[in-house]
Amino acid sequence: MRLLLPLLLLLVGCAPAGGQQRGGIVSLNPCSDQLLLALVPPDRIAAISHYSQQAGATSMPLELARRLRSTGGTAEEVIALAPDLVVATSYTPPATRAAFARAGLRTLYLDAPVTIAESKAQVAEVAQAVGAAKQGAAINARIDRAVAEARWTGAGVPALLYISGDLANGGGTLLHEMMQVAGLRNAAADYGLAMTGALPVETILAHPPAMILRPDADGRTAAIRRRLLARTDAGTREIAFPRSLINCGGPTIPAALERLAAVRRQVAP
Amino acid sequence: MKRPALLGGLAVLVVALFVASLMVGKAVVPLSAWWSGDWRWAIIAELRLPRAALATLLGASLGLSGAVMQGWLRNPLADPGVLGTSGAAALGAVAAIVLGGATQWGIFGAAMACAAGGLALLAALTWHAETPAAFVLAGTVLASLAAALTAFLISIAPNPYVVAAAIDWLMGALTDRGVDDLTHAAPFMLAGCALLLATGRSLDALTLGPDAARSLGISLPRLQALVIVGAGLCVGAGVAVTGVVGFVGLVVPHMLRPLAGARPGALLVPAALGGAALVLAADIVCRLAPGAGEVRLGVAMALIGAPYFLVLLLGERGRSWG
Amino acid sequence: MGLRTDDLHVVLGKRTVLRGVTASFAPGRVTAVLGANGAGKSTLLRACAALLPASSGRVMLDGRNVATMPARERAQAIGYLPQDAAVHWNMVVRDLVQLGRLPHGDDGGEAIAAALAATDTIALADRPVRSLSGGERARVLLARVLAGEPRWLLADEPLASLDPLHQLETLALLRAAAGRGMGVLVVLHDLTLAARVADDVLLLKDGAALAHGPAAEVLTGANLAAAYGVRVAILSQPDGPVIVPLGRA
């Protein structure tokens, strides 16, 4: 017992090793991680979100992500880095926000954009905040070019996009607008799904789409859905769609639009 | 109410709801398509028929488990969940979803394995227990532990989609359950129901208390084993295939007791039929709700159960005040 | 052919509740089991019904050890009426009495009718048990035991919470049962009623048999003082002796 107190003090005093970095930008979300990397050089980034270092959740190249420092998103870690700017989503818990405010940190909270226009506005906002307005304009120009190239004015090809497992992408989302631009008609929105949700197999069978885009081949209902769709004469195809193109807007939009257009060209050249 | 009339009425209700369940769904299948080569028959045969059969089995298992649990614990408000098996099965399923392996077989296997583990733990904790209180406590320990571990698993989920999938599954649903789900779960549920149906006379004797029951030749350890294994199989297999569906085991026996008589053994078969009817009816309502998706079955059950108990409470207060 | 205990020891937890009780009971007679609180009366009955294990010694029924008899045979031979008049569900009287037939596995319509008649509860047959008065419920629970047609009836304080009229009626029922050839062991607290109904008395003190024999011989001032620590007055009345506690011995 007498050794316990000194032992505890010793443990408390053992702070994690690491340079006392100060300044830079801390990002707490994989989408803003990706945006920042497109706007500023890596040495200005103090830390990114730990999600960007996991294969299933990242929107940036893993080797690059692993070279950067990451945080778990707690106020303690962020404040210890004494950054110039903290970029996070509007879902940041109130307690964490209050902690940032008390520490006097400059913060930028971002909503999830649901239209391409909103996404471009967000790119411009973040670019302004980090003093990289030119790079922001360049990203938005790339987005405009991608929209122009992918745009299809013919009849939309009905398509169902799964974002993960059995979760489908409905109307009112960024992906929905991108699908429309690329000439794909969002079947889930036709079924009445708003935002994201699960769709019963029967609903899909009643009006089968021309194609199903999905990141994983297996979901709980994938097998039975495939079996029954094969019985219809709709000829629905299943096409892989990378998960990394699903999660974020901003710099991901050109790549996503390109892929969607390519998929549409398989059916309607 | 006379017993043949009660059983006949409930059986007719179950059959009627079963047929109605085949006719309800998001897709429209005209009668001409039934039993024909029309591919739409596959919707009936491969989606709605197994779903209705599963709903019937699930409801019967839960209703019967509830009736037996209430008889065994001598408490009209006992619920099969008190054993903690549903929590354990849910833990297994969420573990499969979060840690990978969220395929049909994967989720079922993990959930049944955890349910079996939970039962074994319960048996070990209550090896020489004399009173129902010991079981309720042990079940609470198990349920609390399972709930804590489930919450922990959800908190370490690698991405928000996995969290959504886990929470969605926990709410309980019969959506898109097919023949495979039925063949996985049916043997366990049927075995569980068979064990539970054998407890009738022992439960009747327990009305007089454990000493008098033993003096009538009833083996209490045998009854305990039948109840735990039977209810564990029923509830474990149910949760493993559909998620957590509560209230059925609590509401159905309670509702039917005035009609079937207070004798615990007389309530078993009516509770099974009534449970099947309730789950079939709720599942129909889930599909009739407007919108692209279906209402979760567990949610629908809670929305039925809570008002039922509010009515009971108001009636009870009226009795004690009047 | 009787019920007897051979050097019966019963230990519950850390306490030795019965020490070496050896007693023999004959069928067709009513034996009152008397003693102070904690003397082991209920324990003796429960051991005889094999509801408790004997730590040493045994209980023999017609030459067979009750603990090793098949449960069904034992249940057919011995009818046990517990002290707590527990009825957990509001069953109809007829169904409740029918529970007594469980060891026989039949409907037992005749036995049930006879039991209802003997306890004068035919009029109550279709009523839910919770609507009955205390005395009526006690008679119904006794009917349940009688419906099993046991050869031995072990009743643990069947008179508790009954008014004087119903106490006398219940005792008359026990007498009649013995008259039909049943062996009856009944735990009682009221000494006068015990003197009235019992052929034999087994007097327990601290788990041991203090005296066992015909009622008139056992119910003496000296024995009762030793067993209860109480001075009593025994007054003769035409219907039987009246035993009244006077003060500490």
Image: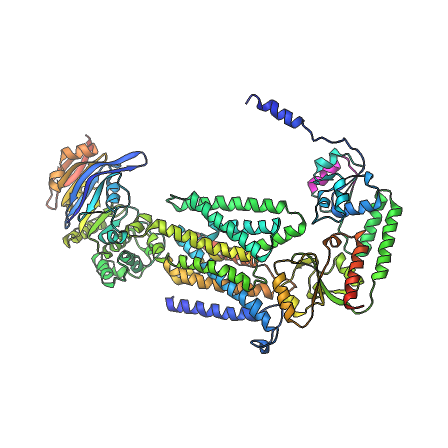
Q: Residue at x 16, y 39 (%)?
A: C243
- Farthest residue, direction right: A134
Q: Main secondary structure of the magenta part?
A: helix
Q: Nearest the camera: B191 or A170?
A: B191
Splitting the image into 4 quarters, where does residue A242 fall?
bottom right
Give residue A33's quadrant in the image.
top right
Q: Is residue C97 above or below residue B137?
A: below
The outermost residue toward the front is A63
C206 in the magenta segment: no
Image point (70%, 42%), residue name: A94
Residue C71 percent location from the top left of the image = 27, 51
Quarter of the image for residue B197 reads: bottom left
Q: In x, y percent, where is residue A177? A: 78, 60
Q: Is residue C207 above or below residue A122?
A: above
The residue lying furthest to the top in this view is A2
Q: Is residue B322 visible?
A: no
Query: Could you tell me residue A132's position as x and y percent?
Result: 87, 44
Is residue B180 visible in this depiction of the protein? yes
Q: Quadrant of the N terminus of chain B?
A: bottom left
Where residue B218 appears, as percent x and y from the top left, is 31, 52
User: Is residue A98 magenta-colored?
Assistant: yes
Residue span colored magenta: A94-107
Left/right of residue B48 with respect to residue C40 in the rendered view: right
Q: Please identify the quadrant where the C terminus of chain B is shown.
A: bottom left
Residue under the point 41% across and 55% down: B68
The colour scheme used to paint the residues is: rainbow
Counting labels gives: 0
